[in-house]
Image (cartoon, rainbow, N blue to C red):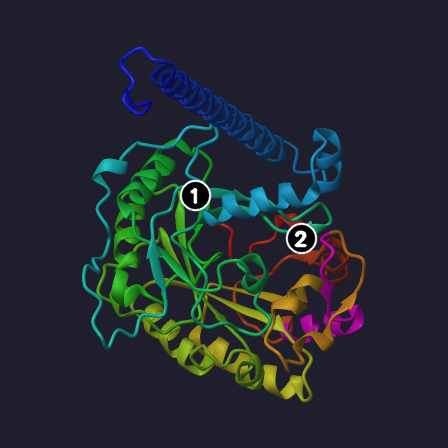
Amino acid sequence: MSLDKEKPGTVKEECIEDHEAETAAHEAFQEMKSESAKQSEREYQRMALDLRWEVLEYVDAHPEKSVVEIARLFGIKEGSIRAWKAHRTMGTYRENMAGKEKTTHRARQAPLFKSEATPKNNTRNFIERKRYSNFIHFFDKTPPGVVCPHFYILAHANGCPYFCDYCYLRLTLRHYPEPTVFSNTARMFQEIRDWLLSNERPSMLNAGELSDALAWDHETGLSANLISLFSGQSRHKLLLLTKSTNVEGILGLEPTPQAVISFSINAAKVARAYERGAPPPEKRLESAARLAEAGWEVRLRLDPLIPIEGWRDEYASMIDKINAVGPGAVTLGSLRFFRALLSHAPRGTDVFEHGVNHQDPDNRLRVPLEKRLEMYRFCLERIEAPRLGLCKETEPVHRELGLPGMGQSCNCTVE
C-alpha cells in the first residue's frame, strides 16, 4: 500500500487540521489585536478632540492669557494651540464645541449659487467648499493697549482676490493660498437669523474681515441676501467692507440704514505700488459716490497710511476726493504687520521697510511713531467727515492726538 494514500484520521490529516487551527487562531488574534488598536485609536482621538475644545473654550474665556501661559497650563505645545485656533477660524473643523459633528440644517443645505458644470472658459478665482465651523464669531483679539471696539465677523469666505502686498491675510490664511467661498449658505443664513434675534446688544456684523465682501458679489449675490436679512430689523448693522467696484447688486436694492458699505482706499501712488490686483482707488470712490447718492450709508477707510516719497501731496489729493464723496465716517490706519508676514509676502516688495518694532502690546511692527503722528495729524486736519477714528492703534497715539480711544466712532462701530 502506497504511503501517499493514507486513510482519514491518519497522522498527515491531523497535522493539516492542527495547522489550519493554528492559522485560524493566529488570524483571530491579529483581528482582535487590530480591533483593539482601532478602539485605542478612537479613544485617543476622542480624548484629543475633547482636549482641543477644552483648550479653545479656555482661550475664549480668558482672552487676557497668552498662548505661552495656556500651553504651560495644559502641558501641550504652543504650536498646537495656534494651529487649533487657526483651523477653527478657517472653518475646517467638523465638530462643534461639544465634540460632535453638527447636523442641524446640514441635510437641506441649499447653495447660494450653483456650479454643477464649470465652463472651459471659467474665470473664477476662488474655490467652493462647505464650512463646518460657525459662520459668525466675535473678534476680540486685540490686546489691552490697542484700541479696537471689537465686532462680529461673518466668515462667508476665506481669502481675497486682490492679494495686496501688505495684507494680513497672507499670514492668517497662509495654509489656504487659494481664496475659498463657502457654499452651504442655508446654514449661514439661519445662523445670521439666530444671531439677529439672540444678540440683544446693538452690534456690527463685519463681512469684510476674512475676505472682500463684494469681490464675487456678481456671482454669489451675497449682498442682496444679507441686506434683506438686516433690513427687517432695527437693532444690528451689516458692514460690507470692500476694495472692489462690484456694487450693481446693491444699487438695485432699496437703501436701508441697517447696511453700511465701506471702501478701503489709499493714495494713488501707494495703490499702484502695493495694491496692484485691486481696482484703482479713484474707481472705488466712484462706486462709493454712486451708493451715497442712492441713499446708502457709505464709510471709507484710508488705510494703511504709508510714508512713501511725496506722501503729503499724494494723500492731500486723495483726501480732496474723499471729501467730494461725503462719507459718514472715515477711519485712518497706518502700516502695521507681524514680523512673520515677511515670510509670506511677495518677493521684491519694499513696503515693510517702513515698519519698526515699538514693542507694542500686539507685537506688530509699525511706522515710526513721530512719522505716524505727523501723517495722522495731516489727514485729520483735512478730512471733512462727521466721524473720524483710527484702526487698531495704540492708546498713547489716541491720547497724543486727543482722540477718545475706546469711545471712538470708527469703521466697525454701529454708530
Alpha carbon distance from label 2 to label 1 = 28 Å
Write the start and end of the magenta stretch as one range: 362-379
- Along the horizontal axis of the image, is 218 left or right of 359? left
Coordinates of residue 409 in the picture (x, y in percent): 56, 54
Which residue does the numbered mark 2 point to in the structure image? 404
- Say few, some or many: other residues with alpha carbon within 10 Å of mark 2 (under 14 / 14 to 19 / 20 or more): few
Q: Residue at x 29, y 57 (%)?
A: 222
In the rendered structure, which disc, 2 or 1, sits on the residue that comes first in sequence?
A: 1
Residue at point 51% right, 54% down?
A: 412
Q: Nearer the viewer, residue 10 or 117?
A: 10
Magenta segment, prevailing SS (helix, strand or loop) = helix
Return the x and y of residue 151 as percentages of the image width and height.
Answer: 51, 47
Q: Amino acid at mark 1?
A: Ile
Q: Nearer the viewer, residue 266 or 382?
A: 266
Q: Which quadrant does the N terminus fall into?
A: top left
Q: Is residue 393 above or below residue 92?
A: below
Residue drawn where x is 45% and y is 46% of the image: 92
Residue beneath disc 1:
136
Above-or-below relation of 234 to 117: above
| Residue 364 lies in the magenta-colored region | yes
Structural crowding at the residue carrying mark 1, measured as other residues with C-alpha within 10 Å and reported as few (<14), some (14–19) or many (≥20): some
